[in-house]
Image: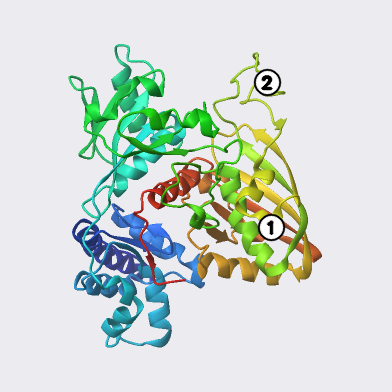
Amino acid sequence: MSPEKHLLDWHAGQTIAESMSPLIGQLYRNRGVEVILFGKTLINAATIEIIKTHRIARRYIGSPLDLQQTRPILQQLTELELSPSRIDIGQLAHRYWQTHNDESGLKDYLQTSLHDALSHTPKAAHKDVVLYGFGRIGRLLARLLIEKSGPGYPLRLRAIVVRGGKDGDLEKRASLLRRDSVHGLFNGSITVDHERKAIIANGNYIQVIYANQPQDIDYTDYGIHDALIVDNTGVWRDQEGLSQHLQCQGAAKVLLTAPSKGEMKNIVFGVNESTILPDDTIISAASCTTNAITPVLKAVHEQYGILSGHIETVHSFTNDQNLIDNFHTGERRGRSASLNMVLTSTGAAKAVAKALPELAGKLTGNAIRVPTPNVSMAVANLNLATDTDKETLNHYLRDIALNSPLAPQIDYTESTEIVSTDLVGSRYAGVIDGAATIAQDSRCVLYIWYDNEFGYSGQVIHCMEQMMGVRYQTYPAQ
């Protein structure tokens, strides 16, 4: 290929990607259809992001996906009467072009593959969401809800609840949403309504409520009714403490973004979300680590059987640690987070059993906090009931990440150059590092990366949707 041909091909790809953006927006705004490509959303994606996402397809199908293969699928989708859903044009294109040489059979193929999405249903009524606490997870949940907001998406972020209320607090909250040292600038516009104490983000009016305890709030005063309260504070982690939210007028359900205590349901989406019942009012979305490892452990257990194992978590530091040495009630956590590797405990291994009871009593776990602000890794040392080898195990895990119901939770990479910062912003619960896999006879060691902030927040969003009855089917079916 001549040097000039590379540039011509790039410009041709830009032209196609530019023509795809309005189609993606049209499907989302008019039909409530979220277009994804191998699990990665294309909503609000820039031209270059669309091109890069097509090239990342090599992780799944062995080669980049040609935009000329997905563009006609998008065009056909705009002509179909679709129900609100998530449609993976990467999966559709890969399957279609494996057996076809032209577009002549595309319409029939899509009508068959998307049959269940063609029975057009009315858009669901809006459902109110309140974020109680606005720290790392709260702000990322806000970003995700704002990103998804549109006529076809029922969940509406109506308010955030924080302590304080001093002069300048509102601007500080807005600034923290606008700028993030780890995840970058907010994708859009944020303004502040000082008179009504609100933040307006990409047209979403978000009431800021100042309160020191749940009992101080009547959500109906702000026009909020039957709301899902997402508690990001971690102050209350049991049924009794979290039930305080339900005593507030306008509150209907509570989701905890931390591991629960007691018998409360711990949900790892993709594993046990089916246990969420319509009359459940309080559940937990477990921890970031539990969400990262449980889907992978489920896949391995179903194929090979896990007899026992140890999970070692290499975890970025968090806000509960000290920047420099100072008093802390936790062992070792008083030492400087930015200067030390800090050995600590984790309940993630035991928490797996709440979502995957067949592994109860089979796993142990520990954690090492390291001087990085985000992205962590779980090292799973497992004893299996069936022998395997690296190639066979990796082939199975790669297929799980591409062609299984766990595909939205599990990503897979075989890059020998990937490091933690490459995973910032990953929307998967966990990413298997296939290059690092060790397997011999009935023993294996798996390395699972995860963005402990963003990936976890994505799992929380899925739980919110399930609790509020607005979970949409993904097509094509895995």
User: Where is residue 108 drawn, in percent x and y?
Assistant: 28, 85
Mark in the foreground, 1 or 2 = 1
Residue 132 can be seen, yes or no:
no
Residue type at the position of mark 2: Arg
The relative height of residue 461 versus residue 230 in the rendered view (above or below) is below
Q: Which mark is residue 263?
A: none
- Return the residue nearer the eye: 216 or 199: 216
The quadrant of the image that shows the N terminus is bottom left
Would residue 342 appear left or right of 213 to someone viewing this image?
right
Counting labels gives: 2
Q: Give me the C-alpha separation between circle 1 and circle 2.
A: 37 Å
Outermost residue, top side: 167
Q: Is residue 240 visible?
A: yes
* Left-right relation of 156 to 348: left
Residue ID for mark 1: 358
Q: Position of residue 94 (x, y in %)?
A: 42, 76
Picture quadrant where residue 110 is located: bottom left
| Residue type for callout 1 | Glu
- Figure check: 169 above or below 77: above
Q: Which residue is mark 2?
A: 335
**Residue 407 relative to residue 12: left or right:** right
User: What colour scheme governs how the chains and residues are painted in the rendered image of this protein?
Assistant: rainbow
Mark 2, Cα crowd under 10 Å, few <14 / some 14-19 / many 20+, is some
Using a 10 Å C-alpha cutoff, classify the residue at mark 1 as few (fewer than 14 neighbours), some (14 to 19) or many (20 or more): some
Q: Residue at x 49, y 57 (%)?
A: 274
